[in-house]
């Protein structure tokens, strides 16, 4: 997983984007949880980009554009739009409507053969809240009133990650929630709180997360690479949540980062690196061979041109010799040469 996926000021947004970018099938359990849609492994996933104007949101600033967090097409038929939101921003529903309308205009608008005109389909949208907040709504709603008086309720579900226990996350295979679960411990690190988080509690909690990921790997819900990615993301989340608690952060780092590289692991890593080196050398040799072939072709082309020029020179020499012989013959019979 690339470093750029999880750095910067919006770590929690970037974690979700990194998961979707590196292992998009991890969204399938979430879609089943929210919409009851069950997709088998191997179902096609296409990540989409949707850009919209920021003018309406900030009319006093120069117009710009922004991308909605995550938009994708699953199975060639189902469109989804996901947003990651840290705080209870009441205006998010208005932005979601704007995103979904722009998305529908860009991807799902078509001629309405039954009733004439056009028809557009909004994507299945949801807002994901990583941090606990008692004011987070179960869903976002907006009543839209059209000029003819007809109304439509725009309503989308929300996902509150911290409302799921670790057991529920495990049972429902919602592994993409795991990099965020440390956020539920943050209130207990407040120095004014009576019940402070202990190192043992943190150790036990981290151990549970690791055991869940190991079991998901063993059961085939994660690949070895995805397991490593989740551990890496969990460690990065710990760096942020525990940034003011060096001893806690060290504890999580020790638990998630192997201290000893076993011979079998070392052998596997060296074999992988050796295979990559061999593949790289083979590619470079192929490029050199292609260059050599190209130069050989150019040498052949140059040789052909030289042969052609030599033939032309020989032909010209023959013509000059014939001309000289004719002049000599004309002079022998005292016939003046044509001028």
Image (cartoon, helix red, strand yellow):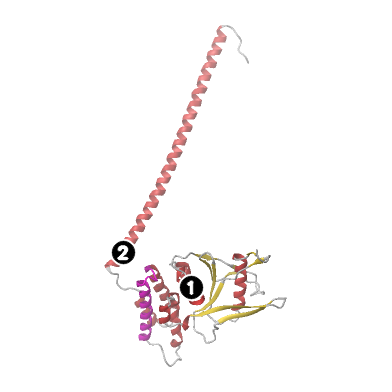
Q: Which residue is mark 1?
A: 16
Q: Which residue is mark 2?
A: 268
Q: Residue furthest right?
A: 148
Q: Which residues are magenta?
A: 199-224
**Residue under the image location 27 percent in, 67 percent down:** 263
Residue 219 sits inside the magenta stretch: yes
Q: Main secondary structure of the magenta part?
A: helix
Q: Does 320 appear above or below 238?
A: above
The quarter of the image holding the N terminus is bottom left
* Quarter where residue 167 is shown: bottom left
Q: Secondary structure at mark 2?
A: helix
> Residue 40's spot in the image, x, y percent?
45, 68
Q: Residues within 10 Å of mark 1 (few under 14, many from 20)?
A: many
Q: Is residue 236 visible?
A: no
Q: Residues within 10 Å of mark 2 (few under 14, many from 20)?
A: few
Q: Residue furthest bottom?
A: 194
Marks 1,2: beta carbons within 8 A: no
> Residue 117's spot in the image, x, y percent?
68, 65
């Amino acid at each position: 997983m690339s470093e750029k996926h999880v750095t910067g000021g919006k770590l929690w947004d970037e974690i979700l984007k990194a998961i979707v970018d590196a292992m998009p099938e991890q969204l399938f359990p979430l879609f089943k949880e929210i919409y009851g849609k069950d997709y088998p492994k191997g179902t096609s996933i296409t990540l989409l980009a949707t850009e919209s104007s920021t003018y309406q949101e900030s009319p006093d600033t120069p117009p710009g554009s922004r991308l909605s967090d995550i938009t994708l097409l699953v199975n060639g038929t189902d469109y989804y739009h996901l947003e990651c939101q840290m705080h209870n921003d009441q205006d998010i529903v208005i932005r979601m409507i704007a995103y979904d309308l722009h998305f529908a205009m860009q991807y799902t608008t078509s001629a309405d053969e039954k009733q004439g005109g056009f028809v557009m389909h909004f994507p299945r949208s949801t807002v994901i809240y990583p941090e606990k907040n008692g004011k987070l709504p179960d869903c976002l709603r907006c009543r839209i009133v059209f000029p003819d008086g007809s109304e439509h309720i725009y309503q989308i579900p929300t996902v509150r990650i911290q409302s799921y226990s670790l057991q529920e996350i495990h049972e429902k295979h919602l592994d993409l929630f795991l990099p965020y679960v440390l956020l539920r411990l943050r209130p207990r690190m407040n120095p004014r709180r009576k019940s402070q988080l202990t190192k043992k509690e943190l150790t036990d909690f981290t151990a549970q997360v690791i055991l869940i990921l190991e079991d998901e790997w063993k059961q085939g819900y994660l690949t070895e690479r995805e397991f490593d990615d989740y551990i890496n993301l969990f460690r990065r989340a710990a760096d942020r949540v525990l940034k003011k608690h060096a001893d806690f952060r060290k504890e999580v780092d020790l638990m998630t980062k192997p201290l000893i590289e076993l011979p079998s692991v070392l052998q596997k890593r060296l074999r992988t690196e050796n295979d990559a080196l061999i593949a790289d050398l083979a590619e470079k040799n192929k490029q050199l061979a292609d260059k050599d072939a190209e130069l050989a072709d150019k040498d052949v082309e140059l040789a052909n041109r030289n042969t052609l020029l030599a033939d032309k020179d020989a032909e010209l020499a023959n013509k000059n010799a014939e001309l000289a012989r004719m002049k000599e013959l004309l002079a022998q019979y005292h016939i003046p040469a044509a001028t």
